[in-house]
Image: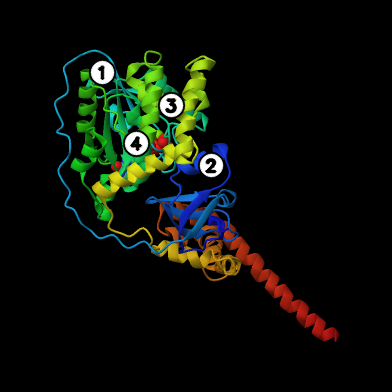
Amino acid sequence: MKTLRDAKIGDTVTVVKLHGEGALKRRVMDMGITKGVEIYVRKVAPLGDPVEITVRGYELSIRRSDAEIIEVEEASKVAERSVSVASSPVASAVSQSSDDSREIKIALAGDPNCGKTTLFNELTGGSQYVGNWPGVTVEKKEGRLKGRRNVIIQDLPGIYSLSPYSPEEVVTRTYLVEERPDAVIDIIDGTNLERNLYLTTQLLELGIPTVVAVNMMDIVRKNGDDIDFGRLSLELQCPVVPISALTGEGVHEVAAKAVELAHGGETAPRPHVFTGSVEHAIAHIEESIQGKVPEQSIRWHAIKIFERDEKAVAGLGFDSELLAHLNEHVAECEKEMDDDSVSIVIDQRYARVKEVTDRAFRRRIGRGQLTLSDKIDRVVTNRVLALPIFAAVIWLMYYISVTTVGSWMTDWANDGVFGEAGWHLTWPTSAKAIAWKEDTAEFMAAQARIEAFESAGDENATRLFRVED
Ligand SMILES: Nc1nc2c(ncn2[C@@H]2O[C@H](COP(=O)(O)OP(=O)(O)OP(=O)(O)O)[C@@H](O)[C@H]2O)c(=O)[nH]1
Ligand SMILES: [Mg+2]
């Protein structure tokens, strides 16, 4: 059996099966590594751990131990995708915000590092910490929309999925599910559309009015990629606004759209993303829990029940009889599909996301290409060459710092800055340099006389020794 661990740099492999179980398997699947997906091996650390891969259009580092549970087989190289499809105008016409002065809450939700806090700062005039790595925000933060004091904007920690693993992911899910903001701005990183839309499919199930903000448009354009926003809006059945939180492009439009949705109380549609038999089982579950959960979020609860999400199900307080009945629907579907319910849901979500991105996104550079940085890394992190290259670089740094540049700098510091000639080198005509010369003139003259006396003494002594000889 070949696993991802055995794959080499530059290989494109297809996932055949995921071994292991429980949280680890779910985590790997939530990252988009599901059966049939292609993985491109970008980098391998010198000792084989971690492995950097490209999957579903984004880069991911995974541990060797995790790579071992991913069974793969060789796949043909992914063909380069060409530039095509002219971008269409913004899907949603940005409408004027309502005059309603009722206090409303708008949550900023999205994957880690997609630009939520940058947008939050832009909208509220705040100065929350922004960093170019995932997990910067770990708790929720509130601010008020500039010019609209009745609109509260809520910055949330980034999440990859509504199945939480870390404490900050629990913060976001609890807020969205239990406190239910009036509207959600789902921020997605336009350079990582496929990865980010996985969460979007889940957020839309919550039944909260949602506007999708495709962020990082400045980079998307620079990369030459092309997003058809009209198509994206159609597929997701919600408004889509392109933005760049960093430059401020589109941020006020997206806020106005969210305010309008919040005031309208318009429930976001809950697009069906699963195949017939799964939707059938979900429909049965929805029927059985009707009236027992809030109507707006019934689909989300039904899917969580289908996934056997313990935390979500425990919170509902259903009796054992109902739970057993619900489980029958799940088991029946699992039998029919010959897979566990979690895998079915994740697989089908990604299949749907792929369908959406295939229709609405064109990437300029092929996924399976090594960048210049990758090519350099391939040499300097090579298993055999890495250590000799490392030793050579360290030796070169040492050589330069103790000879050539290093000795010039030391000589200059000793003689030029701190030595007697120091003032002459720094600024000889400065008031300080002149004062120093005057103050030390007497001392210098005495010093010269001592030196002359000593050298004369040495000469006499030498003469005396010669006479004795
Ligand atoms: N080029 C560009 N960079 C952006 C844009 N929006 C955000 N960034 C950068 O993306 C990085 C992440 O931004 P954050 O606002 O911290 O992202 P976040 O979603 O709050 O991240 P977490 O709190 O970790 O979930 C920062 O370096 C931002 O400067 C954008 O529109 N264009
Ligand atoms: Mg943040």
> What residue sits right under mark 2 in the picture?
25
Q: Earlier in the sequence, mark 3 or mark 1?
A: 1
Element assignment for label 4: helix
Residue 276 location in percent, x, y?
A: 34, 36
Query: What is the three-letter code of the residue carrying label 2?
Result: Lys
> What residue sits right under mark 4 in the picture?
276
- As measured in the structure, the alpha-carbon distance from the residue carrying label 2 to the one carrying label 3 is 20 Å
| Mark carried by residue 120 | none
Quadrant in which the N terminus is drawn: bottom right
> What residue sits right under mark 3 in the picture?
173
Q: Which one is closest to the eye, mark 4 or mark 2?
A: 4
Q: Earlier in the sequence, mark 2 or mark 3?
A: 2
Seen from the viewer's position, the closer of residues 438 and 47 is 47
Q: Is mark 2 within 8 Å of ligand 1?
A: no
Query: What is the three-letter code of the residue carrying label 4?
Result: Gly
Residue 329 location in percent, x, y?
A: 45, 27
For image coordinates 33% across by 23% down, the residue present is 143
